[in-house]
């Protein structure tokens, strides 16, 4: 009689090897049809080599068909089709040749995804890769879609030395997600926003971030958009290039938009060049500590913005409805500053254009220079040690206090009192005009 064979009598390792053989899995051998080779790395992570030059769907089929699970590194060659939906922790996508990419297919494919979507995944890494959503790279095609380069929902994602092209959004962390960029990250030709952070999520940039889009047919365009408690912190440089506004087609792009309890921080750690308007609205907060803004700055609805060590190039600074703006070492090359209803402007060691306050505005200028002041409807200004390079006009019932501290002077200009104002002007600043830029004088007439 034959002896009965029991599988349970074999060693566990032998059973595992037998099962893998039966299903045809060979961990260390190349699969000529799939373009994959899998092995264990020195750190214990599974390493899968994906070559998509011959088969663009190789990574997609392998990732979703035989998901390797957590702690897996995919080393990618060539352009691999997505979308890749990642729920496991410790998944790395690393490009190892110059063509390495993950591509979001265009129409008629499903546009409701990103090239990569991290959903609840911790330590998802995208390195030396192109995320290509350029098939959804115009407003006409992308309108009404959710196509994106990278989505992160309740996940932690690192983007390292990579490039994202096309899509409604380049990077969109939401619902308590964190995205950290390292090295140079470029976000190009997005239709809606390059970086869109919301729902208590965070983007922290440890390297330089460059955003540029030439798309003008999407209607709304903002390079950096923060909403519903979103936060962005740029530590090593930020450059933004957008098309100029075009009234004929109703196109009004914004370089940075910060809304609804969100926070922006741009630190003095690298090149900062923002070509476009900046808006901070609805109880939001922002601080830009260096660089250049080539456009208007709008702050309203109880929001707070600090600008330091930078140039506002050919743009206005507009405060409205309880906004607070603090300026330090700011040069305004052209344009004016409008301080609206219950808003507060505080400036020190800054060279500013005309400052106009209305509806109970408060203006405090210390040192630096200002190209004239106009105050209306209950507004008040304190000017201490600053050089006033044009006239000051007061309209009932506004007032101004001008002090001689340090090197402040009226430079031969006039303070025009138009109504029953209560003001103080340091006597050292007042004398009949002599035409040589010396002290100024007070007139009870209205500003011409």
Image (tube, helix red, strand yellow):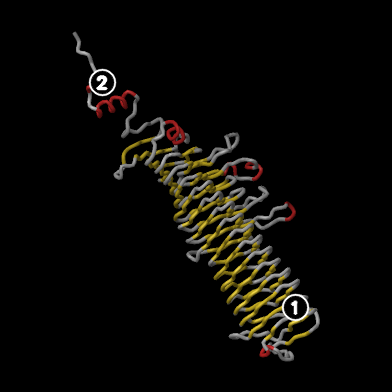
Determine whether, in the image, residue 231 is placed left or right of residue 313.
left
From this viewpoint, is residue 65 visible?
yes
* Image coordinates for residue 301, horizontal then vertical, percent: 66, 60
Which residue is more in the foreground, 52 or 282? 282
For the C terminus, give its image quadrant.
Answer: bottom right
**Pointer 1 and pointer 2: residues touching (CB < 8 Å)?**
no
Badge 2 is on which residue? 7
SS of the residue under disc 2: helix
Helix, strand, or loop for circle 1? strand
Q: Residue at x 49, y 48 (%)?
A: 177
- Within-10-Å neighbours for mark 1: few <14, some 14–19, many 20+: many
Seen at 53% across and 67% down, the residue is 290
Q: Which mark is residue 393?
A: 1
Is residue 401 left or right of 40 when viewed as pictured? right
Residue 253 placed where, x, y %? 65, 55
**In terms of image quadrants, where is residue 372?**
bottom right
Quadrant position of residue 29: top left
From this viewpoint, which residue is outermost toward the top?
1
Residue 230 against residue 46 in the figure, above or below: below
Of the pair 123 and 296, the residue shown nearer to us:
123
| Residue 198 versus residue 266 in the image, above or below | above
Question: Looking at the rendering, which quadrant does residue 320 occupy?
Answer: bottom right
Q: Is residue 438 visible?
A: no
State the image coordinates of residue 355 (x, y, percent, origin top left): 69, 73
Looking at the picture, tell me which residue is in the foreground, 317 or 8.
Answer: 8
Screen quadrant of the N terminus: top left
Asked if residue 118 lies left or right of residue 258, the reply is left
């Amino acid at each position: 009689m034959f002896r009965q064979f029991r599988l349970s009598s074999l060693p566990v390792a032998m059973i595992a090897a037998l099962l893998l053989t039966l299903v045809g899995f060979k961990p260390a051998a190349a699969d000529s049809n799939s373009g994959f080779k899998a092995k264990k790395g020195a750190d214990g992570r599974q390493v899968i080599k994906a070559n998509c030059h011959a088969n663009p769907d190789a990574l997609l089929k392998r990732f979703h068909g035989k998901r390797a699970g957590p702690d897996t590194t995919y080393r990618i060659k060539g352009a691999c089709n997505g979308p890749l939906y990642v729920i496991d922790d410790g998944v790395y996508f690393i490009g190892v040749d110059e063509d390495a990419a993950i591509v979001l297919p265009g129409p008629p494919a499903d546009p409701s995804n990103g090239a990569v979507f991290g959903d609840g995944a911790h330590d998802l890494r995208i390195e030396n890769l192109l995320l290509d959503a350029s098939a959804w790279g115009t407003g006409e095609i992308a309108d009404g879609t959710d196509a994106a380069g990278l989505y992160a929902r309740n996940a932690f994602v690192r983007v390292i030395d990579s490039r994202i092209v096309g899509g409604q959004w380049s990077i969109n962390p939401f619902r308590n997600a964190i995205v950290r960029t390292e090295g140079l990250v470029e976000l190009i030709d997005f239709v809606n926003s390059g970086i869109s952070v919301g729902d208590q999520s965070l983007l922290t940039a440890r390297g330089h971030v460059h955003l540029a889009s030439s798309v003008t047919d999407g209607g709304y365009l903002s390079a950096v958009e923060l909403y519903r408690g979103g936060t962005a912190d740029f530590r090593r440089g930020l450059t933004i290039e957008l098309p100029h506004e075009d009234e004929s087609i109703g196109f009004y792009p914004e370089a940075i938009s910060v809304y609804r309890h969100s926070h922006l921080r741009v630190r003095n750690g690298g090149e900062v060049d923002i070509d476009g308007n900046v808006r901070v609205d609805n109880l939001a907060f922002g601080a830009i500590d260096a660089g250049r803004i080539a456009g208007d700055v709008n702050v309203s609805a109880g929001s707070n913005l600090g600008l330091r060590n930078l140039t506002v190039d050919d743009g206005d600074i507009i405060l409205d409805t309880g906004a607070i703006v603090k300026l330090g070492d700011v040069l305004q090359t052209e344009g004016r500053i409008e301080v609206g209803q219950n808003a507060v402007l505080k400036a020190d060691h800054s060279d500013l254009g005309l400052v106009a306050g209305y509806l109970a505005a408060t203006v405090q200028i210390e040192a630096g220079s200002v190209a004239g002041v106009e105050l209306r409807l209950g507004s008040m200004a304190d000017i201490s040690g600053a050089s006033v390079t044009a006239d000051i006009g007061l309209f009932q019932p506004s007032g101004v206090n001008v002090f001689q501290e340090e090197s402040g002077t009226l430079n031969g200009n006039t303070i025009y009192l138009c109504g029953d104002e209560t003001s103080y002007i340091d006597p050292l600043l007042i004398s009949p005009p002599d035409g040589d830029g010396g002290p100024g004088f007070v007139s009870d007439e209205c500003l011409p």
